[in-house]
Image (tube, rainbow, N blue to C red):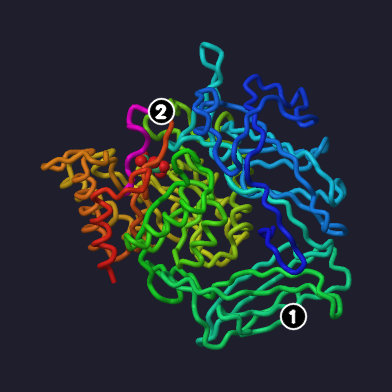
Amino acid sequence: MLRPQDSPTRETKRLDGLWRFVVDSDGVGREQEWWRAALPGTVRIPVPSSYNDLLVDPAVHDHVGDVWYQRSVFIPRGWAGQRVVVRFEAATHRAVVWVGDDRVAEHEGGYTPFEADLTALVEPGQEVRLTVVVNNELTWQSIPPGIVEVAADGRRRQHYYHDFFNYAGLHRSVWLCSTPPTHLADVTVVTDIDAGAGLVRYSAVVEEAGATTVGVVLRDAQGVVVAEGSGDGSTLRVADPELWQPGRGYLYDLQVDVVDGSRLVDRYVLPVGIRTVEVDGTRFLINGNPFYFRGFGKHEDIEVHGRGHDDAAMVHDFALLGWIGANSFRTSHYPYAEEVLDHADRQGIVVIDETAAVGLNLGIGGGMFGGGSRTTFSDETIDRRTQDVHRRAIEELVARDKNHPSVVLWSIANEPESHTDAARDYFQPLFAAARRADPTRPVGFVNMMFAPPDKCTVSDLADVIMINRYYGWYSETGDLALAERNLESELRAWAETHAKPILMTEYGADTMAGLHSADAAVWSEEYQVALLDVYHQVFDRIDAVVGEQVWNFADFATAPSIIRVGGNRKGVFTRDRRPKMAAHALRRRWLGLP
Ligand code: BDP
């Protein structure tokens, strides 16, 4: 599925702005067929945005169930004879779409796009009603999982096994797009380096191809043609390529033309970065050079918008990544907006791309998140059906992001249970699915403290060891000397038993901005600095450690909890992006690293 773009044969119309909006508190909208008329009420809210924080109303903020969005759309009058498509970049966590009275799309999963072909239903110049019901419920069959309980007063309450707030709604842009009836449905690009030359292997899928053929042209950033090819798939050779590199996101443009004789039928232009990614023993190589990840686990989380994409906030976050000397981040704990991947490609920021599979672990927090005494993998909890949804989430992530040079590693889950045989049975087919979907990039998952090297039943399926550890915070609280010892001995055990690159994908401490303490008491800015410093000393002593990503880039909103104060405070920046002391300390370290 190609991202919408304008070209000589394609047009786009973004449907962002204020839409009619109703919270379906009684859950009657589907039965009463609300899509058939104007939605009740006068509320308007913006797309894209989470709806939760906009209206200053607990009934909206904490709603569990359906919400409805609606607007009218003019089908551009110039689109006669074209294929007309509506595309949703994200509806969290699932949606059904109607155009007029016709149901046109349904999608499960809150962070990957979906489309509907409207060609047979609409006329150019016509005004149509577009209605979407978005549902935010997390269940044992959703990724991420959760449970909906009915409280004593009859209200439905959502529980889940991750800390970040369950924001919902239309989080990203909605597009109306035209393509020709004969059109490029997909393009896949894989790059390589061969004796100093860049190789760009492409393959194109054309729908309703008829007698058409495909021709491609590769241009450098100055627009100079550096290679040409023809056919649905072939390999282009670029002499003396400018490589895509961390810190320097050089991009070529691959113009893919579908032609009928000399007539241009469809054109799509795909940015391409020429680079290789490889795991070699305990080293992580980009373009054959050892790469050391410095950066963060992030969240899509800002005031008012919640998880809604905002270009200004994105550009500012990347500027802060540059300021602090970071070269990478992980899309913890779900696929981010496509704008973010595009921006990472251009900025040369390296991305670990993660699915929304977080909280597949009922042991965490001793039931703090509501796990209690249940078993993680069972017929009553996470089962085969969840695994199917998870597999589709992996496939949709790879299908969406496969052409981004910034993406160097897939993370198929964050902190799942991984110390049991059931976990291995669950994950083995998912690793296989990820490798089938993308045979070119390393695959991993993020391990948590219950599954150290001698207990983890899943790590040997992965190409890299990604681990989150909170020595000095959730364990050895306040005791950094002991934290240092335990961290070092665990990392050495991973290095000895696994012989793979080790990436610390989370470490950190909650820190109240402005709380200071001469003896570095927990929660103070001094303690965050001291804890990070201890971890860094350990990393620097262990060769197999190939990266450090602090948890978290910024403070973020969470579900209510007695261990969270106005959200998770492990940010190196506050939620409004002001640096804590740790930001300056990290900047000194990271700008000083080779
Ligand atoms: C880890 C999770 C992350 C949490 C973090 C924390 O991966 O999502 O926010 O702990 O507790 O377990 O701060």
Q: Which mark is residue 510?
A: none
Query: Is 564 a magenta residue?
Result: yes
Give the x, y percent position of residue 586.
27, 57
- Three-letter code for the amino acid on which mark 1 is drawn: Ser
Left or right relative to 395: residue 535 = left
| Residue at figure coordinates x 87%, y 49% from the top left | 123
Q: Nearer the viewer, residue 123 or 421?
A: 123
Measuring 58% from the left and 76% from the top, which residue is drawn there? 252
Point 70% across, 54% down: residue: 13
What secondary structure characterizes most of the magenta part?
loop
The residue shown at (75%, 74%) is 257
> Where is 113 relative to 568, above or below?
below
- Residue 383 versus residue 455: which sits nearer the camera? 383
Asked whether residue 395 is drawn in magenta, I would say no
- 472 relative to 51, above or below: below
| Amino acid type, label 2 | Pro
Identify the residue under disc 1: 230
The quarter holding residue 399 reads: bottom right
Within 10 Å of the Cα at label 1, are there few (<14), some (14-19), or many (20+) other Cα atoms?
some
Q: What secondary structure is found at the residue carrying circle 1?
A: strand
Viewer can see residue 285: no
Report the residue marked by disc 2. 560
Query: What range of the chain is rendered magenta?
Result: 560-573
Q: Quadrant of ligand 1?
A: top left
- SS category of the residue bearing label 2: loop
Q: Left or right of 413: which side holds 177?
A: right
Return the residue nearer the eye: 25 or 95.
25
| Cβ of mark 2 under 8 A from ligand 1 | no
